[in-house]
Amino acid sequence: MAQKLLIDTDPGNDDAIALYVALADPSVDVVGVTTVMGNTTLDNATRNALALLEHVDRTDVPVIPGAARPFSDELVTAEEVHGPGGLPEHVREALPEPTQEPVDGNAVEFIVEQAREHRDDLTIAALGPQTNLALALAVEPRIAEWVDDIYLMGGALTVTGNVTPMASFNFYVDAAAASRVVQEATPKLVGLDVTERVYVSTAEIERLQGEPEPLSTIGDILAFSIDEVRDKFGNDGGLASDAVLVADIVAGLLDYEDAYVEVDTTGGPSNGATIYDEHGVYGHEPNCEGALGIREDASYEDIVVGRLEELA
Amino acid sequence: MAQKLLIDTDPGNDDAIALYVALADPSVDVVGVTTVMGNTTLDNATRNALALLEHVDRTDVPVIPGAARPFSDELVTAEEVHGPGGLPEHVREALPEPTQEPVDGNAVEFIVEQAREHRDDLTIAALGPQTNLALALAVEPRIAEWVDDIYLMGGALTVTGNVTPMASFNFYVDAAAASRVVQEATPKLVGLDVTERVYVSTAEIERLQGEPEPLSTIGDILAFSIDEVRDKFGNDGGLASDAVLVADIVAGLLDYEDAYVEVDTTGGPSNGATIYDEHGVYGHEPNCEGALGIREDASYEDIVVGRLEELA
Amino acid sequence: MAQKLLIDTDPGNDDAIALYVALADPSVDVVGVTTVMGNTTLDNATRNALALLEHVDRTDVPVIPGAARPFSDELVTAEEVHGPGGLPEHVREALPEPTQEPVDGNAVEFIVEQAREHRDDLTIAALGPQTNLALALAVEPRIAEWVDDIYLMGGALTVTGNVTPMASFNFYVDAAAASRVVQEATPKLVGLDVTERVYVSTAEIERLQGEPEPLSTIGDILAFSIDEVRDKFGNDGGLASDAVLVADIVAGLLDYEDAYVEVDTTGGPSNGATIYDEHGVYGHEPNCEGALGIREDASYEDIVVGRLEELA
Amino acid sequence: MAQKLLIDTDPGNDDAIALYVALADPSVDVVGVTTVMGNTTLDNATRNALALLEHVDRTDVPVIPGAARPFSDELVTAEEVHGPGGLPEHVREALPEPTQEPVDGNAVEFIVEQAREHRDDLTIAALGPQTNLALALAVEPRIAEWVDDIYLMGGALTVTGNVTPMASFNFYVDAAAASRVVQEATPKLVGLDVTERVYVSTAEIERLQGEPEPLSTIGDILAFSIDEVRDKFGNDGGLASDAVLVADIVAGLLDYEDAYVEVDTTGGPSNGATIYDEHGVYGHEPNCEGALGIREDASYEDIVVGRLEELA
Ligand SMILES: [Ca+2]
Ligand SMILES: [Ca+2]
Ligand SMILES: [Ca+2]
Ligand SMILES: [Ca+2]
């Protein structure tokens, strides 16, 4: 039986690729997409999620809006990176107009209900700031026990940050939410330690761009980070952080280590930093699994491109 | 028609008096009591709320448990002040065993439902840390527009703190929650500026202690702070902070001023401090009403004792 | 014998008045003026100090420049309040060109030397950010034992701040320095609790403005805050915070209480806040004397204007 | 001509090795040793420095005590690591009684004087918390321009911390001082990124322990971290962080990259963290050189052991 997967997301280019990969893989059954502010506003994130589902004829998957702002911090988005609507303008124009409406409900209730119903048949993948998930845990702490795995896109355990020198974007946007989830959900943390190390090559991306829809636009989305990857990391290819997490869920890509982690919530220059107690200074038991390596026997590009081609 | 009142509370001695006053006053209709950790654990607070309602034969009022911990901070209680179960042991022993069970639901849902149903017929009085209310606002931000007034017990705008030199207890316990509520709920803030200034005199308390139940035990509850009031403020009487807030709701006791307020969430020595922009340094519009004075034409003692005697 | 007084200052309008009062009073002997950034840059503060001394023919008093920036924080000045050079332009134009050069040395060394030499014949009055004094204490901790009294202009123990809602300007500019001095110098803290409560009346100021030099320009300096006092406090008169401190030194104006105080150095919204443990929450012994009242038998206006007239 | 070297230090086992290496190498001329609290109290650090010099007959090198505490933070030492007096008891017992007295002066003055005198003939190596150096810079900012290089032992740019998960010990102890020095001294930062990667092998250490004095005791000092290195890093050998820095000065060991760095001074869980803007998020120019690699053509063990043997 397919693993049920609830995706909490703020699309976002990499969220889009992650969503496509999850939808394409028969081993997972996406039970719903909850949305959250982050890369863009909640309204844009919700609209983008609907458009992405429309694009691959998956309007059977419900979209449920969640938090329009962090729990207590001011709203920050990454539109200067992802585009003013969360996706590059030419991508948003290429995507179909959604025919589906968002579900009239709240992401927090949806997460609680799905967890209660599916128990350990359910995996949760939080690809944006952890606001929805933290609220769900605050309302119903048993979620953490009920479900199978909770994957968090976020953190920078052994590497420097992206949005600030200290913090990964998702932890930075709602550090209090990240802190709560890390404290209680025993999550699998997929952070910059691994997401910045694997790419889909420019050659593959260009090939996808030359294919008919939906691959053509998917290629365009993958292409959006090619320049950044070259300038920042001196590498070739497109980076899609959230897709690394989903690639691991569907095909096994990452090596995890038990880790004790906290999140800096001071509001200072290290706000949202992943406090990773690598050497056991605090003497606490591990509270999460941190993705610190790429499996030698797995190919990110093969996993991602292979699934995407299933959408053709 | 009586004003519907939802009481969110962490009883706690002063919460107990506040609850008695609200239940006794015919101008308000207590639609439910939601509980939260704070003065004691959630379980104790819930049990205490049930016992207090039993004590005055008001088992018609539902009790709905909420947050067992702050949103992202570690749990802190005030059992060294209020007693290890949230009330002095002799009080807990004098109160009847509850026959009512807590409602099988969550305070957050209850707050949202009551607000949706009663709209501006509803007033919310949050007498403990603002965790439940902040979560309710996070799940359903329209609460702030729907309901009539939101009263918060918390803050120290122009005076020093109680739990630390900088912070009032309720803001300190969950500063992120306090921050969220202050940002969005346009609350009426009832803080240490006024609550430490009004008392029920020792003479009146002793008189109540000599009356039959339930007044005798209520007198015992009022008596718990007499020593602290003498030592700390050099005044005579019992202090019941949360009852000041309810006294204002039922009879008009406080003078409010428009104020712009933020809450320190740094986790440092000023964590939970009320950042009160008295002189408009930030240039922001007011976001709350701060109780800064006691009405000259009102008597706290008369309001409180008068209502309590209705319970006899 | 006159009490020797070392004035550390960032003139600044109120510093100017404070300096005039000290120079005019025969009971104190100003052994030197050390300067520090604060209301303006160090260079402006030094030049202003020289010009003020020239203005009243006191070029016998040496001026020794100190810190051009806070210990570890970025430089912040208050030129939008005091004028772009630290004094209103018409005042700077009215003051004579200094004939004296600043001493070729450092304020820190000067403070240490004077303290070593004069021991308890010396009082130090720090009227600006406490950077110089903190550095002197760091180099020579015995200063605190050697000298008679150390007065600090700074703090807001029981009132809200001026530069932010939480902080007084001098503590805010170099919170680490303020923290160090409060920890070790057993200072007399003269803060907003008292400085915002006493004024020289507008009538007296206008009278001074009509007198010959130097009173005319001194009146102009006193006049600079009349509008702010009216708008912010609804009072009549000119406020000269630093002069309150000097008025207390020369004539006894303030009532002090033993207090335990810390300074917030988090860099957050409460940075520079005075953490005043009014009710003994921490259980520490007092580490300073806080000016919390105005003596009933003293008149600030009489003290200040009386001394100023000695300069005619 | 030998490069003049001023060593600021808190011995400390690794400081001892660093000092021996510097004293043994003819290419540097140690002009003085200033001491600072850190691994132990100032008094112990000073006494240890005198004993180490005595041990290798170098009482010609003056020892000048500096800061007994951090600028504004509370004193923290590492005696649980280095031993209650800063060195293991058997080492302190083996070292000779000092015949030299510490210089009657202050490290801050000494640093300023040496920098003024020797200008770019002088290199400063700060092997402990940067308190003395920060104070010297605060009193005389031109030091940074005058001298040749300023090496700081401290920081963790790309790796986790040692004293906390976020901070290296020296930056943690006085984060404000570290922040000041990083801002102004354009230092060469030698941090955990490199110091935890190079060792003197256990075999070499045991060989030294079998030699006559002073090598025998030097071997004992090197041996103190063998267990920690095995348990924490799974490596063989003794770690002497400060000696890595000195090895680079005397023989060239490290590869540096231009870097922009700040230091977290919030006092929160990331206090003392090295904020390394690896990817230019802030857009600031580099303000230091960070040691991020070990030169392929250099052997730490050969450099250190080679110099130590010169002491025989
Ligand atoms: Ca995302
Ligand atoms: Ca309460
Ligand atoms: Ca001043
Ligand atoms: Ca050291």
Image: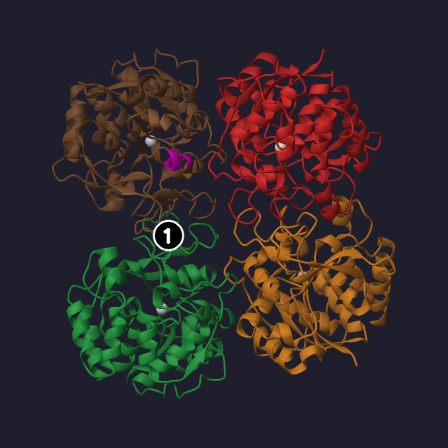
Chain colours: A orange, B green, C brown, D red
Q: Does the image show residue C303? A: yes
Mark 1 residue CB less than 8 A from any atom of ligand 2: no
Q: Quadrant of residue D298?
A: top right
State which quarter of the image contains the C terminus of chain B: bottom left
**How many numbered tags mark residues here?**
1
Residue C95 location (% of width, % of height): 30, 19
For the stretch drawn in magenta, the main secondary structure is helix
Residue shown at the point (59%, 34%) measured from the top left: D86
The residue type indicated by label 1 comes to Met
Residue B105 location (% of width, % of height): 50, 82
In the displayed structure, C255 sits above or below B184; it is above
Residue C45 within the magenta-colored segment of the rendering: no
Residue C25 location (% of width, % of height): 19, 21
Q: Quadrant of residue B310?
A: bottom left
Residue shown at the point (53%, 42%) measured from the top left: D265
Residue at disc 1, secondary structure: loop
Residue behind mark 1:
B166
In the displayed structure, B49 sits above or below C222; it is below
Q: Chain of mark 1?
A: B
B275 and B13: which one is in front? B13
A113 and B259: which one is in front? A113
B65 and D39: which one is in front? D39
C103 and D215: which one is in front? D215
**Which portion, as a residue range, is magenta?**
C180-184
Q: Does the image show residue A213? A: no
Residue C84 location (% of width, % of height): 39, 30
- Rendered-image quarter of ligand 2: bottom left
Residue shown at the point (16%, 20%) measured from the top left: C310
State which quarter of the image contains the N terminus of chain B: bottom left
